Image (spheres, grey):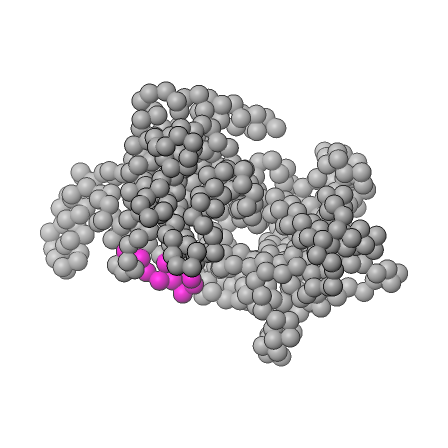
Amino acid sequence: MASLNMQRASDLLLGVSIFGEPIKSKIIDRANSAMEELCKLGTAAGKPMWHQHEDSYEVLDNTEYLKEFRRVDSTLMDIIRLAEVGELQALPSFDSCQNMNPMSTNQNLGQGLQIEATRAMQMLNLSPINVVELLMDVNQWSTTFHNIVSRATVLGSFSDGVEGTYDGKLHVMTAEFHLPSPVIPTRECCFARYCKKFPYDRWAIVDVSLEDFFPSPTSNLRKKPSGCVIVPREHATIQVIWVEHVEADHSQVNDLFKPLVTSVLIPQNGRTSFLKLADRMMRKFCANLSATTSNPWMRLAPSNSVDVRVMIDNNTNNPLGTSVVFSATIWFNINPNRLFNFLRHEKSRNVDSKDKTEIFYLQESYADSSVSYVIYAPLDESALAYLAKGSNPDNVIAYPSGFAIIPGGLDRNGYQSNGNESLLTVSFHILDKAITNVAGIPPESVQTIYGIITETVNAIKDALSYHTLHDNWAQDELKNGLTTKNFSV
């Protein structure tokens, strides 16, 4: 709580200082320069600036970037030219080499500083202003991207364009980003988000870091010019070109993560209720797994090499009492898509009920190139009937448990992943009446937590070994089907 109060006080001081000169003018200048760079990067042809990755995105060539945007001094440029023609016999002195880019200073970052730069393009059936409103309304943006944004705050706004429109609008913001595992530290930064309209209804929105104006000890991420260029196309479609270019501190990241970093017949109003509840489950699940400071994660003593994290959810609005969230992240030598399609199928999680009580589960599954989710929550028969009538899903209590799959990692020998490794986070959210306060977890609850995690992990390992041994993955995947978005009851 003290850290949150300090963060609010820091945000308040920043909000006051951004409107004073010369800071305001410097922020506007920084935003305009970043906008120019983003548009060049976004519209540049492929090679030599961008190289196609085996997945559906491109990777920035850092040497070409340095040459194009002159982020180095003349001495280093001479070295690059000599390397290109193979004449390195007489290298100049490095004594005068200095970083000329104020946006890439790493004074406050750790020794694990690394550059991450990618570009992706997508056609959407939207109008340009729809995307602009989504990104410039910070509440809407953080809600839409809840699976990666823990929190976001606008410290101040001003405009150098047309008042009352998004053209020329500039936000000074702080944000915290996360991946779906409490093992992975969150990333925090302070940045400007600047929006500009161009001829022919083209728009661009750029983010760029302001840490050199407002240093913060909690910042471990710097945004070089990043964002999107929105280009109208035929048939009322748009092309969104997204560039993400950051410097991130990897020094606190676990080595495993460094390479990353069915339906029932229900009336339409009932389907809407189920979809809303599934959406709430997804948001809660992602919020639970974040390593943000508002989540009081505790690390249990290691057992059988499984690193288990626990968090007590003492929600006073929950009439059922205290619940507990616990999770573990495990490396698997299996393709992430294959693991996702295995876990999302309900027959992969058959559990015999000793008292033969029928339990229903609402499941939401989602996958893209960076992360996959399979999330579910138990519902009793009365809740099922209540939702099927189209009633308010906010009145239904659901504890989301499930799986998050991140591609990549290092294999057991410490070598770079070949694309067939997965980092699986298993998370459970259950009611635990044995916990009477947030000060500690009783021994019987610790034993139960370890038992659930261990049994689940071992069951998954056994099932994957069976499929691999009998080489029946293709048959099972054909039966289960391949999808990226699904909810089922």
Whether residue 105 is situated above or below residue 44 in the rendered picture: above
Residue 444 position in % (x across, y down)? 79, 46
Residue 207 position in % (x across, y down)? 39, 40
Whether residue 30 is situated above or below residue 349 in the rendered picture: above
Whether residue 458 is situated above or below residue 11 in the rendered picture: below
Residue 113 position in % (x across, y down)? 38, 44
What segment is highlighted magenta in the picture?
49-58
Can residue 209 be seen in this snapshot?
no
Q: Quadrant of the N terminus?
A: top right
| 195 sits to left or right of 283 | left
User: As drawn, which residue projects farthest toward the right?
Assistant: 355
| 445 sits to left or right of 403 | right
Name the residue: 39% across, 45% down.
227
Name the residue: 31% across, 22% down.
22
Whether residue 241 is situated above or below residue 1 in the rendered picture: below
Name the residue: 32% across, 44% down.
198
Task: Give 125 or 368, whichever is nearer the viewer.
Answer: 125
| 140 sits to left or right of 345 | left
| 286 sits to left or right of 248 | right
* Number of on-image labels: 0
The picture quadrant where one finds residue 223 is: top left
Residue 190 position in % (x across, y down)? 43, 34
Name the residue: 41% across, 37% down.
166
Q: Quadrant of the C terminus?
A: bottom right
Task: Give 268 or 279, whichever is nearer the viewer.
Answer: 268
Secondary structure mostly seen in magenta is loop
